[in-house]
Structure formats: C-alpha cells, structure tokens
Amino acid sequence: MRIAVTGASGFCGGQVARAAAAGGASVVCVGRRPGPVGEHRFWDAARGEPDLAGADFVVHCAAAVGDPAPGSRAEAAMRAVNVDGTARLLRAAAGRPVVWVSSASVYDPRRGRERVTEDHPRAGQLNAYGRTKAAGEALALAGGAVVLRPRAVYGPGDTQLLPRLLSRVRAGTLLLPGPDVPLSLTAVENLAEACLAAPGWPPGAYNVADAAPYGRDAAIAAVLRAHGVRARIRHLPLPVAGAAARAAQSLARLTGSEPALSPYAVDQLAHPVVLDVTRARSRGWTPRRTLADHLRELRG
C-alpha cells in the first residue's frame, strides 16, 4: 500500500506518516518540508497541485492553523491553504480515496454541544480557522472524501494546544473562563489510527475523539503537574472573559496580529463540547489512547 500524507512535517501528519510506515506501508510525504519517513514530494498547499502519482490513497493533514484577526492577511492566507488548497488537492487526487482531516471547530457554537453528532449544524464559526475548515470540508464531502473531525488534538510533538495552555500561566495562576465543563480531547495516536482505517469507510463525516470526555479543570491540572508547573486554577467570570476577548480582538484588527485572547478561545474552554464517536466506532475504530497515557509517558 502506498499512502500519500500531506502536511507530514507537522504534528498530525507526522504521526500519520510514522504510523503508516510502522504498519508496513510505503509513505509519500507531500509538503514544503520532508516528513519523518518515506519519500518527500514538495507541495505548497497555498498554490499549485500536489504530485500524488502512484499513491493508493491520500490523507490530507496539511492546514493553516491559528486564530488570526478577522480581515487580516493571515486570514486570507489561511483560506488559500484550507479552502483553495483543498480544491487543488481533490483535482490532483483524480478519484483516489481521500481522507480529509477537519476539526470540531466547524460545529455551530450557538447550539448546545453536550453531545455533538455529525449532523450538528455547521455555521456561526467564531474564527477564520473554523470558517475555512468548514468551507474546505464542504468541498471534500462533495468530492466523496471521508472527513474526520477531531477536537483539541494533543500528544508528542504538539506545538499548539498544550504549549498555548502552559503559556497562559501567570504568577502561579491560570485563569479559566467560567466553571468546570466536560470536554472532548483527541489523542494524536487515536486520530492517526482513524486516518489509516478511514479509506475503507463510506464517504462522509466522522467525529474522532478519545473514548470519554474529560473534566476541564482536572485535565488541565494534570497537564500542569506533568510539566512540572505549579499553578492554581482560578475561574474568571464568563462575562469578564468575553469582554476581554472582544477587546483583544478589536486591538488585533488594528495591528493585524493574532489576538492574545479571542472569543473562539473563550468558547472552546467555557462551554461543554462532547463529541459522539458512535459513527466511527461502528466502522471498527476504537480510541485506545488517553490523556493519562500521554502524561505518564511525558513524566518518564
């Protein structure tokens, strides 16, 4: 089996490439930089079409991530990768099976998310990342791809989720918006296993997350301990957190930079978001990895 993995030099794509190679597949890493294993073929997802010759199927992990200010150049660059790049990838795939890694950020935050199925509305996204991932996955779904929707992916090599969290600790205190809530997280190993199994699934969307949600405060406290960070978790009233996020976003619009705090970031931490993974489980996928596994290995 010959598998093309886009974005294989990144966090998620690298894990998919390594898992595929460990399973005996021949891996083609498609992106601007070489991946951890296999052959490298250069592709800038913001322009041009990738060379997918010889690949039996494609796992598309390449994406622009972040929380840019609305209307900024960074938002336009994100669209060039997440939407326009998807259209070019689908043309290059030319009928090959495509697994397109999306995000739970596509789900409408204005509706209750205590149990989110794949039929939850996809509208009202709070930032450019959510909007461009929703637009990109719409193209992928129309093209017959399998679309995976993980939430808050963590694991070895993470450069976004946990590092950002740790950077918020100030003077031994971590402020979190609102009271404790249940949240789905996705181990990168669970996502990689789903990516490699998904070519055999019917086209459509599938949530991908760890087997059970986590209590926000307990999970974050465990992460802090595992990193040797001594900090007390304090709850910031939600109206105060929302006002601070709106002010930071307004400032970011003026400077063109990424806001230090955004309504999206507040939303992701302040409201219950639990993904229902029944559909993926029905295809034989089982999320075996947990946050405790990751933190245990982190501590050595």
Image: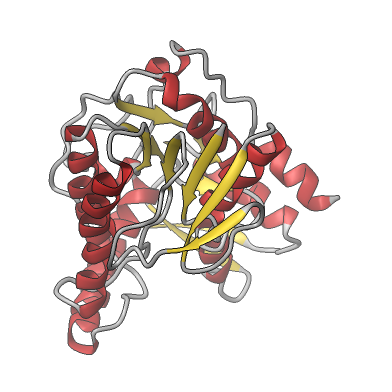
Instruction: Examine the rendered structure and indicate whether residue 144 appears above or below residue 50.
Output: above
Q: Which residue is drawn at 24% across and 81% down?
A: 252
Res. 61 visible in picture: yes
Image point (31%, 75%), residue name? 259
Question: Which is more toward the observer, 106 or 219?
Answer: 106
Front-most of 46 and 156? 46
What residue do we see at 18% from left, 40% from top? 138
Point out residue 45 in the picture as x, y percentages from the top left corner: 34, 63
Q: Where is residue 104 in the image (x, y as percent from the top left)?
A: 33, 40
Using the image, determine if residue 140 lies above or below residue 31.
above
The correct choice, above or below, for 286 with respect to 105 in the image is above
Position of 72 relative to 127 (above/below): below
Task: Say which quadrant the N terminus sits in.
Answer: top right
Relative to 174, is 115 on the left or the right? Answer: left
Residue 273 spot, x, y in % from top left: 36, 36
Q: Nearer the viewer, residue 169 or 125?
A: 125
Q: Residue at 70% across / 37% down in the picture?
A: 292
Left or right: 24 in relation to 265: right
Q: Which residue lies furthest to the front in this view?
A: 54
Residue 126 lies in what quarter of the image? bottom left
Q: Is residue 143 left or right of residue 226?
A: left
